[in-house]
Each structure stands twice: as C-alpha cells, then as structure tokens.
Image (cartoon, rainbow, N blue to C red):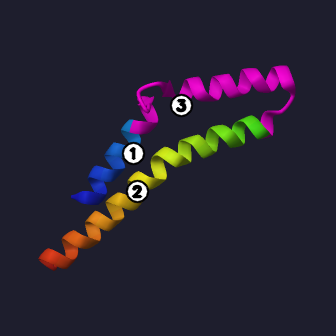
Amino acid sequence: MMPAFVNFLTEMLKITSLLMAIGIGELMYRANTLGAETYRFMELYTAAGILYFAVIFPLSVYARRAERRRVQRTGN
C-alpha cells in the first residue's frame, strides 16, 4: 500500500499548491514571465526545477525508507 500512497501524495503535490504558497503552474508561469523579460530562461527554469525537486524528493526518500521498515517488520 505504501508505494500507491506515495504516488498518490506525489501527484497531489504536483496538481495542488506547492507548500501551500506557490503552485507549480504559478511557479512555471513566473519563471516564463521573468525569462521573457531577462532572456534567462535556462536559469529560471532550473531554479524552478530545483525548488520542485526539493519538495518531492524528500517525500519519496521517506516513503522508500518507510516501505523498507514495513517489509522488515512484517516480512511481506
């Protein structure tokens, strides 16, 4: 059940607000707008990707560890 739950939670983070302050759509829109003004698309998209990764990756690592602990305890 844990992998399915983590996938669901990750998808929810992707489609809902990110950290309850900045939505991924808004984040990419702002990066695009600033990129159009400064012609620095790569830097802004990279920063947006790093921010997004910083939220999703720890959640995935936590879920992987929790799943391993569950398997060790139950043997399933």
Q: What is the CA distance from the residue labelled 1 to the residue labelled 2?
A: 8 Å
Task: Report the disc number at residue 24.
Answer: 3
Given the image, on which type of amino acid does mark 1 rest? Thr
- As shown in the figure, which amino acid type bears the numbered disc 2? Ser
Q: Residues within 10 Å of mark 3 (few under 14, many from 20)?
A: many
Q: Residues within 10 Å of mark 2 (few under 14, many from 20)?
A: some
Where is the C terminus found, in terms of image quarters? bottom left
Q: Which residue is mark 1?
A: 10
Number of numbered discs visible in the structure rendering: 3
Q: Judging from the image, what secondary structure is the residue with disc 1 in?
A: helix
Secondary element at image label 3: helix
Numbered range of the magenta stretch = 13-42
> Where in the figure is residue 45, as x and y percent of width and height?
71, 38
Q: In the rendered view, tell whether residue 46 sits above or below residue 21.
A: below
Residue 63 appears anywhere in the view:
yes
Label 3 vs label 2: CA separation? 18 Å
Residue position marked by numbered label 2 in the rendering: 60
Q: Looking at the picture, which amino acid does disc 3 mark? A: Ile
Residue 14 picture location, percent across and down: 45, 37
Of pointers 1 and 2, the one earlier in the residue sequence? 1
- The reply to whether the magenta stretch includes residue 71 is no
Q: Are marks 1 and 3 in contact (CB under 8 Å)?
A: no
Quick one: 7 or 44, which is closer to the camera? 44
Task: Tell me whether the residue at label 1 lies in contact with that at label 2, contact meaning CB atoms closer than 8 angstroms.
Answer: yes
Q: Residue at x 79, y 40 (%)?
A: 42
Residue 52: give x, y in percent of width and height.
55, 42
